[in-house]
């Protein structure tokens, strides 16, 4: 079959994941999944602003990412739960084409019965409110330029509850799905996409912190046994999908929830 199908025109140029000329912000890119996402975006030619709370660690990360030889890493130091931290990030980045809300997590497993209101607020702030505020800040520019990509990093816990988690974190990650789908509908006509990537259990430093804080018996072996692939994921296996979502090839992928979890049906 040749020509067009219905009203859909054939592409005028070959689709690719080339991100040359695009500026990306990756929150929480100092280590773990965020660092792998920053590396993947750099490898596709983007300028990538990496942000964390410790200046020396951010500097070291920028230096290491710079050695990849593609794209341009730029460091930014700040706590994103503060307005000053967010403003610093947005000043450093300038016009943002791609926003990856990756910074997140929780400090200790806590049930609904145990959680204090402060813990709940902290988990909602970092995992849901900060992504919302950053989206709100970059969207006017994206809408004006008729191009933008929002990629929110959620968690398998949004669909597969598990023991030894943090109730506010689960609520926030579940909220991120609804928020992103609604946002996708609101901005679709302006060439802006919004998607969620929900990782399963991934071997990062955060996971080591989690093992230290969790009940005895919770460790790599017990978590791997819940995953059909039979092992934990690697950060690069989550990051692999991000250049596609961030590229022109991802223009029709919006409001999607992409599960990358080794086939886990329970987290
Ligand atoms: N690892 C998993 O198994 C897993 C599973 C499902 C979902 N996820 C999600 O994937 C994302 C990344 O997880 P990860 O395991 O790679 O986490 P991680 O190793 O703990 O890294 C989290 C990053 O977020 C940054 N961060 C934390 N709080 C911040 C704040 N207030 N302001 C600025 N930066 C802050 C940290 O940087 P600094 O410490 O330098 O500030 C760090 O770079 C999170 O959203 C997490 O919920 C992870």
Image: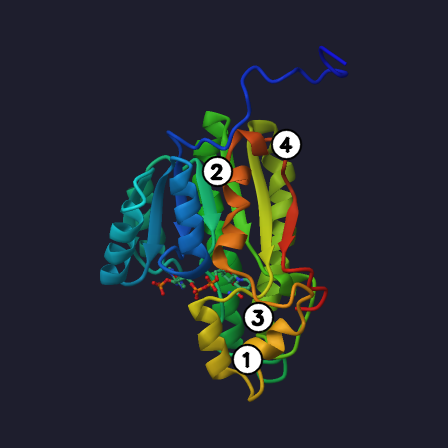
Query: Judging from the image, what secondary structure is the residue with disc 1 in?
Result: loop
Q: Of circles 1 and 3, which is in front?
A: 1
Q: Position of residue 133 (x, y in %)?
A: 46, 50
Tag 2 near tag 1, CB within 8 Å: no
Q: Residues within 10 Å of mark 1 (few under 14, many from 20)?
A: some
Query: Could you tell me how far apart the alpha carbons at marks 4 and 3 are, in whole angstroms?
Result: 32 Å
Q: Which residue is mark 3?
A: 168
Query: Could you tell me how far apart the alpha carbons at marks 3 and 2 are, in whole angstroms?
Result: 26 Å
For ligand 1, the image quadrant comes to bottom left
Identify which residue, 26 or 169, lies in the foreground. 26
Q: Is residue 107 visible?
A: no
Q: Is residue 123 left or right of residue 75?
A: right
Asked if 46 appears above or below 203 in the picture, the reply is above
**Residue appearing at x 55%, y 80% in the figure:** 219
Q: Which residue is mark 4?
A: 252
- Tell me the quadrant of the picture where the N terminus can be found: top right
Query: Could you tell me how far apart the alpha carbons at marks 4 and 2 are, in whole angstroms?
Result: 18 Å
Q: Residues within 10 Å of mark 2 (few under 14, many from 20)?
A: many
Task: Give the mark nearest the N terminus, 3 or 2.
Answer: 2
Asked if 217 appears above or below 189 in the picture, the reply is below
Residue, far top: 3
Q: Which residue is mark 1?
A: 219
Picture quadrant where residue 232 is located = bottom right
Q: Position of residue 5 (x, y in %)?
A: 75, 16
Q: Of circles 4 and 2, which is in front?
A: 4
Q: Position of residue 95 (x, y in %)?
A: 37, 35
Give the number of the disc on residue 139.
2
Q: Residues within 10 Å of mark 4 (few under 14, many from 20)?
A: few
Task: Give the mark nearest the N terminus, 4 or 2.
Answer: 2
Identify which residue, 223 or 257, lies in the foreground. 223
Task: Give the mark nearest the N terminus, 1 or 3.
Answer: 3
């Amino acid at each position: 079959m040749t020509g067009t199908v219905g009203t859909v025109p054939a592409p005028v140029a070959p689709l690719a994941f080339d991100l040359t000329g695009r500026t990306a912000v990756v929150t929480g890119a100092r280590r773990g999944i965020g660092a792998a996402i920053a590396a993947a975006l750099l490898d596709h030619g983007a300028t990538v602003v990496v942000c964390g709370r410790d200046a020396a660690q951010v500097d070291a990360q920028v230096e290491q990412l710079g050695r990849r030889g593609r794209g341009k890493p730029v460091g930014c130091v700040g706590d994103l739960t503060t307005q000053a931290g967010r403003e610093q990030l947005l000043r450093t980045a300038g016009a943002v084409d791609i926003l990856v809300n990756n910074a997140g997590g929780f400090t200790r497993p806590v049930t609904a019965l145990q959680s204090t209101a402060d813990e709940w607020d902290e988990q909602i702030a970092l995992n849901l409110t900060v992504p919302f505020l950053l989206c709100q800040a970059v969207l006017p520019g994206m809408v004006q330029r008729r191009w933008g990509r929002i990629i929110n990093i959620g968690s398998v816990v949004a669909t597969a509850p598990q023991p030894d988690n943090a109730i506010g974190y689960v609520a926030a990650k579940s909220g991120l799905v609804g928020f992103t789908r609604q946002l996708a509908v609101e901005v679709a006509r302006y060439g802006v996409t919004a998607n969620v990537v929900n990782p399963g259990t991934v071997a990062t430093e955060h996971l080591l912190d989690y093992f230290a804080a969790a009940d005895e018996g919770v460790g790599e072996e017990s978590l791997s046994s819940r995953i059909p692939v039979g092992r934990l994921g690697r950060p690069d296996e989550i990051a692999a999908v991000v250049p596609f979502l961030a590229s022109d090839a991802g223009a029709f992928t919006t409001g999607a929830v992409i599960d990358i979890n080794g086939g886990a049906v329970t987290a």
